[in-house]
Image (cartoon, grey):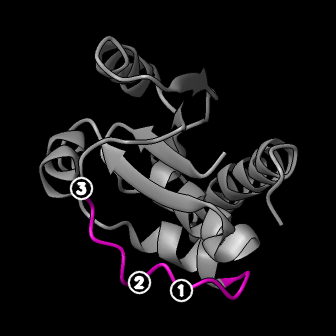
Amino acid sequence: MQSVLFVCAHNSVRSPMAEALARHYFGKSIYVQSAGVRAGERDPFAVAALDELGIDGSKHKPRTLAELEEWEGLNFDLIVSLSPEAHHAALELTRTLACDVEYWPTADPTIVQGSRDQIMDAYRNTRDGLSYRIRLRLRSEGGA
């Protein structure tokens, strides 16, 4: 596997976390991008959760699948969808693309309410779950 696209609803939390984690673990050995079904905004809690691991997520600019397709095309070996809406969009895309699609149901930490610590715990859980799956899945494909 040489290229992976992570997709979620807004490209604000789950897919940019996955993109940043995959780049952190696999560097340039795998080309990684992320996108959302709809436009979103950078999430400061997602940036903070990545920062705890020494990963800079502050430069991420959310983009949609349509924008990614327009700018770079959609030539990926694997599309990983992280939300039901993203999975539906990925399956639609693969009607015309030859790539694999995997659905990794991933909790949306933005729905958690409470103290800052409770919210950050939700983001950490999402980050750590993605980290585990990324290392397991991409390492098995010959990544670093």
What residue sits right under mark 1 in the picture? 56
Left/right placement of residue 97 relative to residue 108 reads: left
Q: Within the magenta stretch, is there residue 103? A: no
Residue 114 shows in this picture: yes
- Amino acid residing under circle 3: Glu
State how far apart marks 3 and 1 are (Cα). Answer: 23 Å
| Range of residues picked out in magenta | 52-63
Residue of label 3: 72
SS class, disc 1: loop
Residue 113 can be seen in this image? no
On screen, 67 above or below 19?
above
Which residue is drawn at the image coordinates 24% and 62% (left, top)?
41
Q: In front: 91, or 12? A: 91
Circles 1 and 2 in contact, beta carbons < 8 Å? yes
Please report the residue visible at 39 percent of the width from the left and 14 percent of the height from the top: 91
Horizontal side of 137 relative to 71 (left or right) equals right
User: Mark 2 — residue?
Assistant: 58
Which residue type carries mark 1?
Answer: Asp
Q: Residue 6 location, x and y as percent?
A: 49, 45
Q: Residues within 10 Å of mark 3 (few under 14, many from 20)?
A: few
Q: Amino acid at mark 2?
A: Ser
Tell me where residue 1 appears, x and y as whole percent: 67, 45
